[in-house]
Amino acid sequence: MKPATYTNEQIIEAGMQLLTDKKRVTPFAIRNILGGGNPARIKTIWEESQKTALEGQVVSHWVELPTEFADALEATKGSLDELAKRMYGRAQEIAESRVRETIAAARKAKETAEVEVAEAMDTVEQLDSENARLQEAVEQLQAELKRVNADNSRLQERLTTKTDKAEKTTLEAKDEKARNRELEKQLTVNETQTRILEGQGREQQITISTLQGKLEAASQAHQQLELENNTLKADLKNAESTQQALNGQLIAAQQQQDSLRTARDQARAGQQEVQQQLAILQTRLEDAASREGELKQRLEQSQQAEEQAKATAAELKGRLAALTPDGTAENKHAPGAA
């Protein structure tokens, strides 16, 4: 800390205060009143002020005669010798008095110097104590500064951590906002898709009605095919009966042919007629076999058509079940219900 600087007037005023209080004026006493200052500077300024005051007093002594001289001069106006003697004696007394005063002043100065030395020692001790106290305070302040620096470091670390967390939170908030925007977009898309699905639902309802009509038509076609199938089965049965009859006739004809062959020698005249009848029977048998094949083919076609109708009906039922809300399809004309 830089020492405080005091003006010359403050130093002289402090010394005059000590004189007024009838105390010894020393640099350290003035310093105690001022609360600081350089003792050497205080001593120089005070001594110069006192020297100036003494020079003023000396000049006044040379200008005015002392009272003793003035009184002796008045009393001895009649005789110069007597006056000279008295003046000399008085001068000697004054000189002796001045010597005594000088000695007393020297002693006083010595005592003052001793007091100043003692005060200086006290001041040095006080300064040492103050210095020790200040040194201890400095050490405490340094320790406090270290603690504060450590606290600042910890606070800086916490601040950095919180800043990182804040930045992370800000990024997460930005990500959350982005996700919210994406969700809003998705919600808009979902709403659009919902409207589209509602339209598709209405279209599917129309499709269901159409499919129900087609299923009913398919069911009617299936019934018609079953009727045709039954008719073809009856025709096939009749053809089979006819074939059996023809087979019997063929066997009978073969037997007759055998008989005719046996009697060929006896009835060559009737061989041609028998052969003609046999040819006719053979043609009729071939026609019956051809008709039987045709009927079988028509039966197979009918069965294939029936299987295809059943598959179409099952497919229509599946599509209808997938499109209806309860997963079932009403079918009053389902195949096999007839």
Image (cartoon, rainbow, N blue to C red):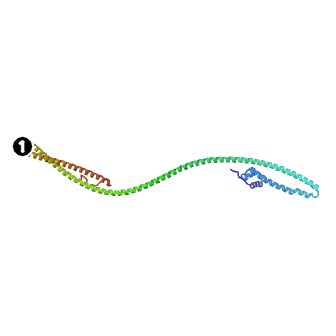
Q: Position of residue 245 (x, y in %)?
A: 13, 47
Does residue 103 appear left or right of residue 267 in this picture?
right
Does residue 143 appear left or right of residue 231 in this picture?
right
Q: Which residue sits at x=8%, y=45%? A: 272
The residue nearer to you, when weighing 71 against 319, is: 319
Does residue 185 appear left or right of residue 275 in this picture?
right
The residue nearer to you, when weighing 210 against 92, is: 210
Q: Which residue sits at x=82%, y=49%? A: 106
Does residue 29 appear left or right of residue 100 in this picture?
left
Q: Position of residue 30 (x, y in %)?
A: 75, 52
| Number of other residues with Cα within 10 Å of mark 1, as a class: few under 14, some 14 to 19, many 20 or more | few
The residue nearer to you, when weighing 110 against 172, is: 172
The residue nearer to you, when weighing 261 against 161, is: 261
Q: Position of residue 78 (x, y in %)?
A: 94, 58
Kindly identify the amino acid type of the residue bearing the numbered disc 1: Arg
**Residue carrying label 1:** 268
Tally the numbered discs: 1
Q: Which residue sits at x=63%, y=47%? A: 142
Q: Position of residue 218 (x, y in %)?
A: 25, 54
Residue 69 visible in the current orientation: yes
Mark 1 residue element: helix
Residue 26 visible in the current orientation: no
Q: Which residue sits at x=33%, y=57%? A: 203
